Image: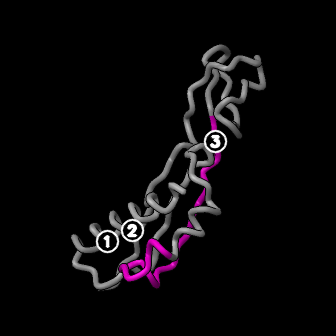
Amino acid sequence: MHELSIAVGIVDLAEKEAEKANAKRIVSIELEVGKLSGVVLEALEFAWPVAVKGSMLEKAEKVVVEIPGKAKCSNCGALFDLENLYDACPECNDYIKEVVQGKELRIKSLEVDF
């Protein structure tokens, strides 16, 4: 389950940023996870308690925002919702596209206490 290593990486990054700000604790964290990022949200939820145990995030509120997938067709230029990376353009059925949204995996915000 690579979601545990992802969760541990998020904890490490969040703690480093909180320490730079001389924060005593992290109150909340907001994550953006793209639908096409390869992260299984249920597995991330399962791994989260293990990753945050003993960290500044142990008692923090976690908010996860799932970013939907969107692509632009290289053939006809249509912008369309993308459920899977291998989906065709609904306008012209071409498979060549540029993913413009949905691969994100980032910490959007941290709320800290001093």
11, 43: nearer the viewer: 43
Q: Does the residue at mark 2 contact the one at mark 1 (Cβ under 8 Å)?
A: yes
Residue 15 position, x and y percent, is 31, 71
Give the secondary structure at mark 1: helix
Residue 23 position, x and y percent, is 27, 80
Disc ID at residue 11: 2
Query: Which residue was labeled with disc 3?
Result: 69
Whether residue 68 appears in magenta in the rendering, the answer is yes
Is the C terminus in the top left, top right, bottom left or bottom right quadrant? bottom left
- Span colored in magenta: 50-70
Q: Nearer the viewer, mark 3 or mark 1?
A: 1
64, 109: nearer the viewer: 64
52 versus 1 height, above or below: below
Q: Residues within 10 Å of mark 2 (few under 14, many from 20)?
A: many
82, 40: nearer the viewer: 40
Disc ID at residue 15: 1
